[in-house]
Image (tube, coloured by chain):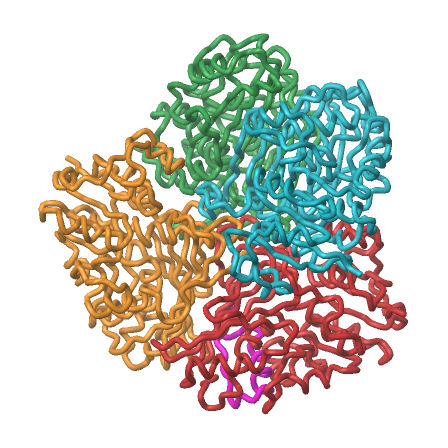
Chain colours: A green, B cyan, C orange, D red
């Protein structure tokens, strides 16, 4: 017997990706597509690539109807998802692709989002190390059976997965000087009609945004690294839009006294059994094209002997492993399904 | 009376850009197009965008003919240009877009290029600060009347221009921890028929290359920063190919105790009168699309208060300001022409 | 019990797509990856997006080994596939993505390919109408149980599916004046290292090729239309490379005296039950982005009242429905499996 | 002494391109930048590539101020330009990049634009043949000294230039069956914030629009062909957006009984002396990348012996030769300046 699922925000980019993946997921039945802005239209009008569900009608967001489903997936701007979640009974499992319940610090929330914090939910990054772990287990235990899950930010997933094994090297890695520069595709910004997201502005362009310490993903990355055992992480974070639809390539440097061999050994140990994280062969660097549409993070690390810094990179599809794929992975864990169920690992370049 | 110019490597990407700009330059007459690999064909077959010179024939590289021109522009792989330059009389002004004569340290050359050093030429970056200068003057004096000029590497130009004003802040900027991550277009790699430069590999991709301390531009950047007065620069350098033809966006971080205001003040002072460097208004970040085809570097700097690092960025067109435009700018200085002659500042996005 | 499959040409673009789809196909086990040019390497080196099979070794093409598999998929240039196929016993089902066995006319083969014809195999386009049919059935009967299948050319599939319902309108459609213009992605050209297929040549470009009546897909399209009942089809065929990896948008005009309503009715009748052909709602035109990675053809038709011509369009992913997806669809029919088995209908834009 | 020029619609795509070209034009001084929507801001905020005029302020559209300039360039949506033009004295030369005054038939205007016709101005396509001419001269005479010029539609320019020499072949070319399919870049649609013009919708996509006889450029193309001497032109017109910013590749077929040699001869005769039209060498087809930023149309023609149709293609930059470049070319003629003044012929790919 499959579980019933509703997707709220069905006409958006993240909602569409959730529907693409859920259509091929054997454990669930999609019973509701909701989106206030496009209620009354058919899904295919908003997502011409979704043929399985093309003729399904989009409803207005309806909290009463949501109260009856097994699983509610919220693919909404922050604020909106918190408001709906607050009205749903505990019997509904809620997975929030928005930011509302990611941060543990109400103070950080206030500083970076400028509103009151809605509380913290179990964090939907199964591969997140907890201090002292050599392989991620504690986070999976937290997610098992959870009735509320906050899905990580896509850039956060990329930077966390690239670097967290370094936490096991203690003082040998100086996380107070972590510099993360990210090449980011346009789907991360959703479908908002803004001048800098138009085709004319995007083609042949590399365009930085939110430069200089104010990006909302910074406290979330640092929270993750602290969870992994880093005493005092400080992140410089610079995202750059480049002409691709899907994908994040996070390139990260951290000063280190560890050797290349030590780095390789630790990264290998941490990710050896992860079904969705592939530490690439030495000398092969992650690329975004290869992970398009897949719930995969490819990772590489090396020691730059010239500078004494480690360079770690991670490529993900921001919509897949970065949002909807990661969400379904957490959903599988929460519902007691196989973690890998319905999640593709091959890309579609 | 105009000067006669020969371009060697005319069918390549850098040679083509030199010809595009020289066609509209009032001080020179293009008398020879040379390229061994395509001798006997017409220029238009290799550069369909060059209509002014489309029907001009390409000759084999001919040192005797070169000895008779006023100006020889070498747009060749390193090694090849050094060999030709060695055979030309001093009466010919030689501008080398290759790497052979950029580095001052024979040891660095040996370490990064693996061959014997051919000697050091005046360095063709007019805007390069010398220690103690607040505005670039000494380098222009070196270039005035020079009969040999080594044109900088394109990535080097971007990183140097983004960061060199920091040298004036002394101990307040810790250049031993400079992290440069670059989004780079495909023309930087020339026209080589390599799998990773195919359209199939490039579209929708962000693809790092030469990661980890071995890139040949590293010693050149550090040489420039030392020239600008930095005691001990150490550069981490990570280039990432993104789907654009022209353009480099260099995003650089350096730990600093200077304030945002101090940074702004120094950067403004250094670049206030530069005809080809535009420090953008506060809060506006450089983009590559805007400088396509122009001999322009756009620059921005800010203080990331969260991390205590400065973030500086520079966008150039790697073929224009990064190679052929910078070359012509140096040529103008060497020949006693107005520095800005024939050099566009508006982009063609 | 699954069937054993070998893919020959595994490191190429079509072979890679076959492997991507076969990895998720429950009816087969991939036992051999063969490719002479890359024998000894791992599949992941050639297709970084294929993670399921990334560590599988590529073997030299080995006819003896092929003789033992249930299914041999040949993803090779024409000529090469014909030669291998000739050596395989009838017990092996052979699916040829190359052109060798598509054409029925030895004379056409000689004229367009310049070599001796290798004979005609059952043609792998299940949706191909036969004269008099209103829904495709005869071609599926031919494919049921076939031990040899010639997979159609990708452009041919697009033009055929766009226009073949018109055959049912008899004299009302003048197929002697069919004009087909196609926007084509780069994967159609494979991975050959040619100057016009490099990233530098492709970005921001629309580049026609093989213009003027000599394209090898012309006789194949006309053969299909004759099969569908058209007396005397004459095709003008103009392909244009545009900056995308996957995808063909075929835009076709044909003079007609039929009304818009008649056209709509016939197209709807022909495609009503086709699992992989979607006649879009009136006024919605096919786009290539929506079918990326899917075994789907989207089709639209209208009457241009101004000119008295019908305009029909079809979008497919040239690698998926255009090659490997269509191949697997035919394979399913030949092997007695459900026609839709393992074939995605949602795109991954 | 230079002439004073005002550009109305300065913050739009066409206005920006006019300013890019006028900045480098020795015959004019730009005295006013006007745009109601962005009045009060600086030009550089809207066009980061325009550095020469970056700090110039944009004014509200001011008819009184316009009455004092020598030249007013209107880069506005149709309707808006007609309204302003009606208020300007004859002493101001007005060049309208909009559609208001292109069509001669008030009935066509009503049918395609749905409003009252504002009258017909001299048509700004200097290369337009008049019936009986073998080289364009009459249209240049019309433009010489004109005080009002209607700049052609960009798609119209491409289709007209590709095919008009065929008018000289009389009955040998059947213009009642002209099929034009165009690959079109995004700048043709301007900067409107519409979902189908977003980066997300554009990348890796080929997307037809305005299919089926209703496109407003159809009566304009037919008007041009009649002017060139064609008795009864009927155009099928299908534009397809492809992922590039600038550029139109028009691919056109017309049934013909003329031979390849006859076609070549006539096309050569018509375009032999045109400074901005390049008939490419036989076998070389136009590409859009090569004409980016240039006031150039590249043209090719051949006979498809298989179908008995001619295939003619034309590539232009829709913003340059297609709009602002063509406008300045007509302006030069109207003002008695050299026709080629300030107009680049080399592309910037």
Q: Is residue D229 magenta?
A: yes
**Region in magenta:** D209-236
Q: Is residue B81 magenta?
A: no
In the displayed structure, does residue C3 sit left or right of residue B246?
left
Is residue B173 shown above or below C86?
above
Is residue D161 shown above or below A157?
below
x and y percentages locating residue D311 in the rendered image: 45, 74
x and y percentages locating residue A31 in the rendered image: 40, 41
x and y percentages locating residue C109 in the rendered image: 24, 66
Q: Residue at x 67, y 68 (%)?
A: D323
x and y percentages locating residue B165 in the rendered image: 80, 30
In the displayed structure, does residue A189 sit left or right of residue D49?
left
Residue situated in front as seen by the camera: A347 or B16: B16
Q: Quadrant of residue C135?
A: bottom left
Q: Residue at x 47, y 48 (%)?
A: B199
Q: Is residue A86 visible?
A: no
Is residue D125 shown above or below B295?
below
In the displayed structure, does residue D69 sit left or right of residue A125?
right
Q: Residue at x 29, y 75 (%)?
A: C233
Q: Quadrant of residue C38?
A: top left
Is residue D38 shown above or below A113?
below
Q: Is residue D154 visible?
A: yes
Q: How many numbered marks are there?
A: 0
């Amino acid at each position: 017997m499959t579980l019933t699922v509703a997707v709220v925000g069905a006409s958006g980019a993240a909602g569409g990706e959730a529907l693409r993946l859920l259509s091929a997921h054997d454990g669930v039945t999609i019973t509701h597509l909701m989106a206030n802005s496009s209620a009354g239209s058919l899904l295919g009008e908003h997502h011409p690539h979704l043929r399985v569900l093309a003729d399904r009608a989009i409803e207005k967001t309806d909290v009463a109807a949501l109260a009856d489903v097994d699983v509610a997936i919220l693919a909404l701007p922050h604020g909106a998802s918190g408001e709906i979640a607050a009205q749903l009974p505990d019997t509904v499992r809620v997975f929030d692709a928005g930011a509302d319940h990611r941060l543990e610090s109400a103070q950080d929330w206030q500083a970076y989002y400028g509103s009151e914090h809605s509380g913290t939910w179990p964090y939907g990054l199964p591969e997140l190390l907890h201090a002292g772990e050599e392989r991620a287990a504690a986070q999976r235990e937290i997610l098992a059976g959870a009735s509320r899950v906050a899905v990580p930010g896509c850039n956060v997933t990329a930077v966390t997965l690239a670097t967290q094994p370094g936490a096991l090297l203690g003082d040998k890695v100086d996380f107070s000087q972590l510099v993360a520069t990210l090449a980011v595709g346009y789907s991360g910004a959703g479908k908002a009609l803004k001048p800098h997201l138009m085709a004319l502005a995007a083609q042949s362009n590399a365009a930085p945004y939110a430069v200089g310490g104010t990006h909302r993903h910074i406290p979330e990355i640092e929270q993750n690294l602290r969870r992994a055992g880093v005493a005092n992480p400080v992140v410089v974070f610079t995202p750059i839009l480049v002409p691709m639809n899907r994908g994040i390539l996070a390139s990260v440097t951290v000063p280190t006294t560890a050797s290349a061999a030590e780095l390789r050994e630790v990264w290998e140990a941490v990710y050896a059994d992860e079904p969705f994280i592939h530490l690439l062969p030495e000398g092969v660097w992650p690329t975004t094209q290869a992970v398009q549409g897949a719930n995969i993070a490819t990772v590489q690390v090396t020691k730059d002997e010239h500078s004494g810094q480690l360079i770690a990179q991670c490529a993900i599809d921001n919509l897949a492993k970065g949002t909807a794929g990661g969400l379904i992975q957490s959903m599988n864990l929460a519902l007691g399904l196989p973690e890998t169920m319905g999640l593709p690992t091959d890309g579609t370049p």
